[in-house]
Amino acid sequence: MNLMSLLRAISLTEGMSFLVLLLVAMPLKYLWNQPLAVKYVGWAHGVLFMALGALLLLAMWRAALPFRTAAIVGVAALLPGGPFFADRLLKRHQQSITE
């Protein structure tokens, strides 16, 4: 798996973990008094978010990912569902460097 494929996979996984945190774990905590869901899902989401940031920096350095694209992907990671829309930019860059 090359760097851009790994970046896309981590980005999509991080986006999914954010949605699970918001749509599953938070209701479990606040509606059904199950705080462990937020603890574990939040921890996993945090690790994935930090990995995404590190991979974006690495992709800018090793895969010539433009700063603008990295910034858009980084900001999209802060929005629920954002990584799924930002994946289009990463896919476009991945295709341009493999041609």
Image (cartoon, rainbow, N blue to C red):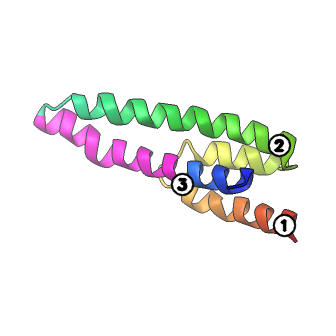
Mark 1, other Cα within 10 Å: few <14 / some 14–19 / many ≥20: few
Residue 24 coordinates in the image, percent (x, y): 27, 46
Q: Earlier in the sequence, mark 1 or mark 2?
A: 2
Q: Cα distance, mark 1 to mark 2?
A: 16 Å
Q: Earlier in the sequence, mark 3 or mark 2?
A: 3
Taking 13 as reference, is 6 left or right?
right
Q: Which mark is residue 98?
A: 1
Queried whether the magenta region covers residue 45, the answer comes back as no
| Nearest to viewer (mark 1 / mark 3) | 1
Instruction: Specify the amino acid type for callout 2.
Output: Met
| Magenta stretch prevailing secondary structure | helix
Residue 44 coordinates in the image, percent (x, y): 42, 35
Quarter where residue 2 is shown: bottom right
Disc 3 element:
helix
Mark 3, other Cα within 10 Å: few <14 / some 14–19 / many ≥20: many
Instruction: Specify the amino acid type for callout 3.
Output: Leu
Queried whether the magenta region covers residue 21, the answer comes back as yes
Residue 54 coordinates in the image, percent (x, y): 68, 34
Report how many numbered discs are placed on residues in the image: 3
Q: Which residue is mark 3?
A: 12
Q: Which residues are magenta?
A: 13-32
| Nearest to viewer (mark 1 / mark 2) | 1
- In the displayed orientation, state which residue is furthest to the left: 32
Disc 1 element:
helix
Q: Earlier in the sequence, mark 1 or mark 3?
A: 3
Instruction: Tell me if residue 25 comes above or below residue 96 in the rendering.
Output: above
Disc 2 element:
helix
Q: Which residue is mark 2?
A: 60
Instruction: Specify the amino acid type for callout 1.
Output: Thr
Taking 18 as reference, is 60 left or right?
right
